[in-house]
Amino acid sequence: MKIATFNINGVKARIEALTTWLDEANPDVALLQEIKSIDENFPREPFEDRGYNLETHGQKGFNGVAILSKFPLEDVSRGLPGDDSDEQARWIEATVVGDEKAIRLCCLYLPNGNPAPGPKYDYKLDWMKRLQTRAEALLAAEEPAIMAGDYNVIPQAEDAKRPEAWTEDALYRPETRAAFRRILNLGFTEAFRARTQGLGHYSFWDYQAGAWDRNDGIRIDHLLLTPQAADLMQDCWIESAVRGGTKPSDHVPVWIDIAA
DNA sequence: ATGCCCGGTGCTACCGGA
C-alpha cells in the first residue's frame, strides 16, 4: 500500500495539479493538509470519480485536512483531542483497511507558530503536547499506526539548506525540536530518516526568491510510525519533482510503501 | 532584505503561510 502525505496549499487552487498527480502517481491513500475549504464546499467529484473514498475536516479560509483512500476508511475521528475550545481544523484520523493489514492513519497539520515567542508559538507548543498524548495512546495500542503530515518542524540542521537562517524561527527553535524529539523518543520511527541520510532532502520550498531553483528548502513533512507500522515499511521517499510542475503547491508529497 | 510569492477573503488591501 502506497501512502502519501501532501500539503496542497488550497484544494480549489490545486485541482489541476492534484488530479494530474493522482493520475500519474496513483497513491492508494493521500493525506492532505491545508485544504482551505469548509467541508460543504470541498470539490469531491474529481476524487470520487477516480475511485477515492474521501473524508474531510475543514474550516473557512485556512487550515483543513482530508484523507483520500482507495481502500475503505473506518472509525473516522476529527480534531486533536485535549482542548475542546480549539476551533482549528488540523487533525483527522481513520483506519484504512488494506488487503492484509488495517492501519490507523492520522493526518495532521501542526501549527506554524510564528512569530516566536508569542501566543501563536504558545499554541504550537500546546498543540505538540496534545500530539504527544495522542501519540502515547497510539503506542499503547500496539497496532500499526502512522502520524503523517506537515509538522512545521525542521528536525535537524541537515534538514535545511540554510539552517542559520532559521535559528529564531518557530519551525527550528530548540523548544520546537525538543518537543518533536520527545514524541519520536517515545518509540516512533521517522520514516524518511530511517532510510535516507545526508544533505539536500527537502519537502518545502518558498514561493519567493527562487527558492526552488536554488534548492533552498526545508524538510518539514514527516511520517512517524509505531513499531508495528515500522515493521511493515518497505520504502519511503520524497517526490520533489512535483515542486517543478504547473502551478504547484509549495510542499511536495512524501511517500511510504507499507506491506498492508 | 520577514520585502520578494501565493491562496483566501471579499473587493482591493490585508492576513496567514514558512
Image (spheres, coloured by chain):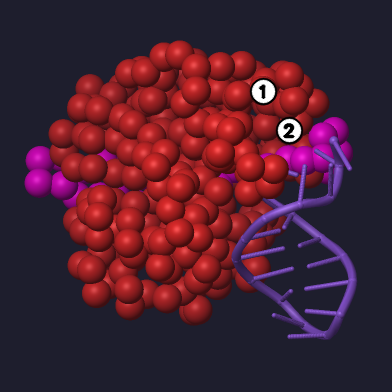
Residue in view at x 25 percent, y 28 percent: A235
The chain painted purple is: B
Residue in view at x 20 percent, y 27 percent: A234
Numbered label attached to residue A162: 1
Residue A234 horizontal side relative to residue A216, left or right: left
Position in image of residue A143 (x %, y %) = 27, 32
- Residue A118 located within the stretch drawn in magenta: yes
- Residue A97 located within the stretch drawn in magenta: yes
Identify which amino acid the numbered label 2 is placed on. Ala
**Quadrant of the snapshot with the N terminus of chain A:** top left
Q: Nearer the viewer, residue A222 or A9?
A: A9
Position in image of residue A220 (x %, y %) = 55, 34
Chain letter of the residue carrying label 2: A
Identify which amino acid the numbered label 1 is placed on. Arg
User: In the picture shown, does residue A194 fall above or below A253?
Assistant: above
Residue in view at x 33 percent, y 77 percent: A45
Secondary structure of residue under mark 2: loop
**Does residue A187 appear in this view?**
yes
Pointers 2 and 1 within a single chain? yes
Q: How many marks?
A: 2
Position in image of residue A203 (x %, y %) = 49, 36
**Quadrant of the snapshot with the C terminus of chain A:** top left
User: In the picture shown, does residue A66 fall above or below A38?
Assistant: above
Quadrant position of residue A112: top right
Chain letter of the residue carrying label 1: A
Residue in view at x 47 percent, y 46 percent: A243
**Does residue A93 appear in this view?**
no
What segment is highlighted magenta in the picture?
A: A93-119
Q: Which residue is mark 2?
A: A170
Quadrant position of residue A224: top left
Q: Colour of chain A?
A: red
Q: Nearer the viewer, residue A185 or A70?
A: A70
